[in-house]
Image (tube, grey):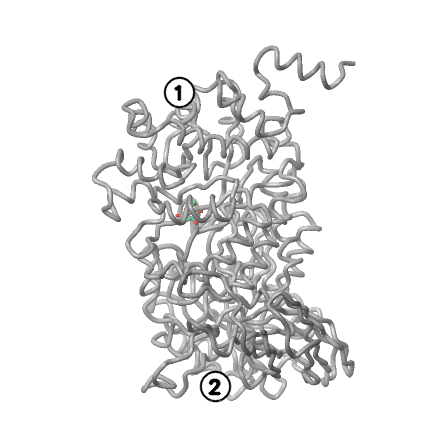
Amino acid sequence: MFDKKTIIKGVSFMNYTYKNALLPPMERTLNLLSLMTLEEKVGQMMQISYNMVNVTEAEQWVKNKFAGSFLHALGDNADRLQELALSTRLGIPLMFGIDAIHGHALLNGATVFPSQLAMSCSFNPSLVESAGRVTAREVSADGLHWTFSPLLCIGRDTRWGRINETFGEDPYLIGLLASAIIKGYQGKNLSDPGSILACAKHYIAYGESTGAKDAYDTEVTLRKVREVFLPPFKKAVEVGCATFMTGYQSIDGTPMTANKKMLKDILKDELGFDGFVVTDWNNTGSLVDKQKVSPDISDASKKAIESGNDMIMNTNDFYGATLKLVQEGKVSETLIDDAVKRILNIKFKMGLFDAKKRRGYISTDVIASKEHQEINLELTRESIVLLENKNNTLPLNNIKKIAVIGPNADSIQAQFGDWTFFSHPDPNPEAVPNFEYYTMLRGIRELAESKNIEVTYHKGCDIMDKEDIDIEGAVKACEDADVIIAVVGDCLAMNGEFKDRATLDMPGSQQELLEQLKKLNKPLAVVLVNGKPLSIPWIAQNADAVVETFNSGTLGGKALADILFGEFNPCGKLSISFPYHSGQTPVYYNHLPGWHSPKYADLSTAEPLYSFGYGLSYTSYKYSNLTLSKTSCSSKDTITVSVDVTNIGKCDGTEIVQLYVNDVISSVMTPVKELKGFEKVQINAGETKNVSITLSVSDFSIVDADEKYVVEPGDFEIMVGPDSRDASLLKEVLTVF
Ligand code: GLC
């Protein structure tokens, strides 16, 4: 056989070294780039949305304009387009992207995990990584290569429509979970058949827009961007996230698509990001028709290129405009080369040219396999948060009959939430799932009947419309029940892009339904199926038990039943605060000091209804013995914080021990506390565990008024406990010199 040298020589002879899989990706990239025409280069920058063109147009984009990528093309359609691409002059393969946000959920039949917000309440990076791995295998089995996930936006104003897609309100937790799921998606090697590209989005501060208005202006300073919003994205660069996506938003009047400072200077030059940046949906066109900073698509295209966008999602006029700009010398071809180099380098790195990423390389048997379902069930159970449990209403015991009431008890649409085949690429509420799933009702019914407990069900009312209500019928259905389980919340019409809310109240007639059920004086357990925190003070006050499931995915009902019947001791903790009232938002825990009044004049407290990090268990824990390995140190040091946690209840459990830090005096105002570490520990009844968390003092750095990252000398309060509330935390002081 030929040795490596001969092969390289042989293939190089045809000057098509880019086809030689033995060469490094960048070498293959440079060779291929040297062979490409301007049309082929600009084509590589185009990402076409399959659901926005007809079949002929899609094929023309491949054959005549050499498009580099499609989104929203599934399985067979993607395959056909790939064949076409491979038959072009240089045979550059297409890259297929998809919104696999909580599983490959746009494919009817794939594993649907809990939403990002739900799974973040597990505080379990390794399970979140497993969810990423499962998703990657199912996306790969479908012949696709790239997920537009994770979303790293910080969910601080819960009126925003896309809160369900965030990992909550804390940058540290977001960075940790985003890094985990990116590792899950991308695996050990991008070129492994079961690996896909991850996409850190939406760079940057997209969720911070004024008034929580989706895609609107975000009045943050560069200092605040660096201090609050950049850290999770920095983590994504550090774990090698292959792509970043910008967003619809603007920062202080500069649209992200035209923000060279953020895209080129900070992301690419300062952080050293070597993947490629894709715009969000028609962001280049938005510079003209929405944000009004460009008179035409030519100017918009020029701005997008010069600011550092490498791939252009669904702005098809960009192609012709950019060819003209380069041909007229208005945009340098080296800028096009920079973008195309980044894209091709990733295509080579992921093995796209080497056939390992073709459909069929991974069997479609992996889709929703038993192994994947088991991982999903484990994550779903750990994502559920017990918010109230008065008089030990839960776990259910000594009962004969359960009444399951409410509009979300048997709604897989509400349980799935956003970014599934019901909602994208086009709304399809009538889609019929072609796989087994567990609504709350099915989960409760199956487990109850296995214990000879009778279950009755009544919907009671709808979420949105006021017509379809039969509260009387629901009350009647509860007549001889020993316990009522009311499953309420919100729906897709109140969550997602373009769906910010002015209030966070329980929608429709659900409140009326709950109040009528309460009058029956039976134990009332409320189960929430919702995309985001709702302002539910009446429920907190009047329900005997409250369980938060958010959008729990395919197995939500099974996981919930395990918790209701005590087969699983709940251990989830909130990754986001719940307001008493929508007027109280934003109400996140890591807020700055200095509010003149301790609370709103018309609210009884300044505290949220439920705090970040809060969640109950069927057992309880006592914290004692907080010690620091040293009480003073330099900013270069590390310290170990230890605490004893005792399970003083009757059943084994898992506790999420949280560590917060407050920089007592700082040159710019800093949050009253910030999560800097946590440990999730299994502690059996009666057992005491000594839990240690080691911190680098450099993690206490702030961004000062000159945008410098500094650890300023002085006192730092080190706080440890079960949640972020002051009353829950043990405190010691560390002096940094
Ligand atoms: C949407 C979303 C983005 C998504 C993209 C492709 O507008 O903002 O998160 O990945 O379009 O579907």
Residue 111 vs 378, above or below: the answer is above
Q: Position of residue 493 (x, y in %)?
A: 38, 59
Q: Quadrant of residue 113?
A: bottom right
Name which residue lies at 67% across and 56% down. Answer: 375
Residue 390 vs 461, above or below: the answer is below
Residue 452 can be seen, yes or no: no
Instruction: Please name whichever residue, 494 or 610, is drawn nearer the observer in this view of the structure.
Output: 610
Q: Is mark 1 within 8 Å of ligand 1?
A: no
Q: CA distance from mark 2 to mark 1?
A: 64 Å
Quarter of the C terminus within the rendering: bottom right
Residue position for label 2: 541
Q: Is mark 2 within 8 Å of ligand 1?
A: no
Please, what secondary structure does the residue beneath circle 1 have?
A: loop
Mark 1 Cα within 10 Å, few/some/many (few <14, many 20+)? few
Name which residue lies at 41% across and 86% down. Answer: 605
Q: Residue furthest left?
A: 295
Instruction: Please name whichever residue, 137 or 175, is drawn nearer the observer in this view of the structure.
Output: 175
Q: Is residue 446 left or right of residue 282?
A: right
Q: Earlier in the sequence, mark 2 or mark 1?
A: 1
Q: Is residue 534 left or right of residue 103?
A: left
Residue 574 can be seen, yes or no: yes
Q: Position of residue 348 (x, y in %)?
A: 58, 30
Residue type (three-letter) at the residue carrying disc 2:
Gln
Residue 321 vs 700, above or below: the answer is above
Residue 296 vs 538, above or below: the answer is above
Residue position for label 1: 64
